[in-house]
Amino acid sequence: MTFIDQWQQAARRNASSLCVGLDPEPERLPAPWTHDTTRLYDFCAAIVDATADLVCAFKPQIAHFAAVGAEAQLERLVAHIHRNAPGVPVILDAKRGDIGSTARHYAREAFERYGADALTVSPFMGSDSLDPYIDSHPDRGLFVLCRTSNPGSEDLQALQLADGGPHPHLGAERLFERVARLATGPWNRSGQIGLVTGATRPDDIARIRAIAPDAPLLIPGIGAQGGDLQATVGAARRCFLINASRSVLYASADADYASAARTEAARLRQAIAAALPV
Ligand SMILES: O=c1ccn([C@@H]2O[C@H](COP(=O)(O)O)[C@@H](O)[C@H]2O)c(=O)[nH]1
């Protein structure tokens, strides 16, 4: 089954557009695990078990594991998701971007070593940096960074392009608009490409939706980053995954962290549904 089919089935089954991000911070683990880097798996697996019926995807962030030498825990965690939350896809957030044999190794790492169903990638090196993923794993998803949620996304992504783009009379195309057009157009040979666009800029989500009416949008920035849920959902309209990491993982700092994560995930799932246009 392709990534998009799997994700859409999970979204329907759980009536959810919520993606829970798994970004474990050793110093924020509940006692007695605080600072214990051997407990990332245990912490995240409990979050998965508490929220599996409330989400359309999980998004582990690779750096949170690799930085402390916990790659084996990430492998176990993805296997745990596939076993305990069957059909819920795993989006590995690694923001890879390279060419040729290096990109082929990144594809093997994400899809074979970790068993991810989709991967986040950078478009900076152009179409041939995506080809190795598509050629080796055409059924897996790729989420291309388009308009990211951080303040620095303004530095490059908002720049107007000197060639103007396809409709210069409407204003010069901006870099993120070009990424949206190319990544979901000619670069999308597998039909499994989506875009990452931050909830901190709902107007630009609306612009991206106009360029790519059917593209899956992975939207971080709700919760800890303060994105406006109502405006975000109104702009994306359909075919999106709203990611929340810290606001779910650390809903409680105490032993009840998993049930608190469930309460927050249920609240978010409901708030997303309530914000959908009728
Ligand atoms: O534009 C982007 C792209 C990726 N991220 C990642 O999403 C989560 C957000 O975590 P929160 O705790 O919900 O803020 C994190 O893994 C980021 O690396 C993003 O925030 N913005």
Image: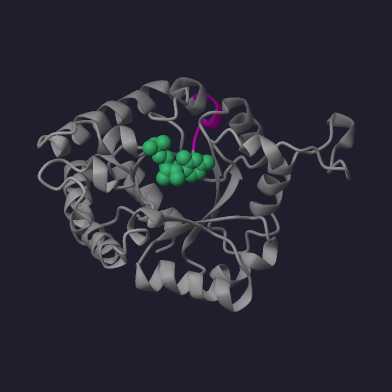
Out of 64 and 76, give the one closest to the viewer.
64
**In the rendering, at what x and y percent does residue 85 appear?**
22, 53
**In the rendering, at what x and y percent does residue 45 appear?**
19, 52
Task: Please identify the quarter of the rendering in which residue 161 is found.
Answer: top right
Q: In the image, is residue 7 part of the stretch drawn in magenta?
A: no
Q: Is residue 269 above or below residue 126?
A: above
Q: Is residue 99 visible?
A: yes
**In the rendering, at what x and y percent does residue 78 appear?**
28, 61
- The residue under the point 45% across, 54% down is 4
Please indicate whether residue 29 sits to the left or right of residue 277 in the image: left
- The residue under the point 62% across, 76% down is 100
- Which colour assignment does the render follow? one colour
Q: Is residue 233 above or below residue 219?
A: above
Number of numbered labels in the structure image: 0
Q: In the image, is residue 236 part of the stretch drawn in magenta?
A: yes
- The residue under the point 50% across, 75% down is 105
In this view, the residue farthest toward the bottom is: 101
**In the rendering, at what x and y percent does residue 269 appear?**
31, 31
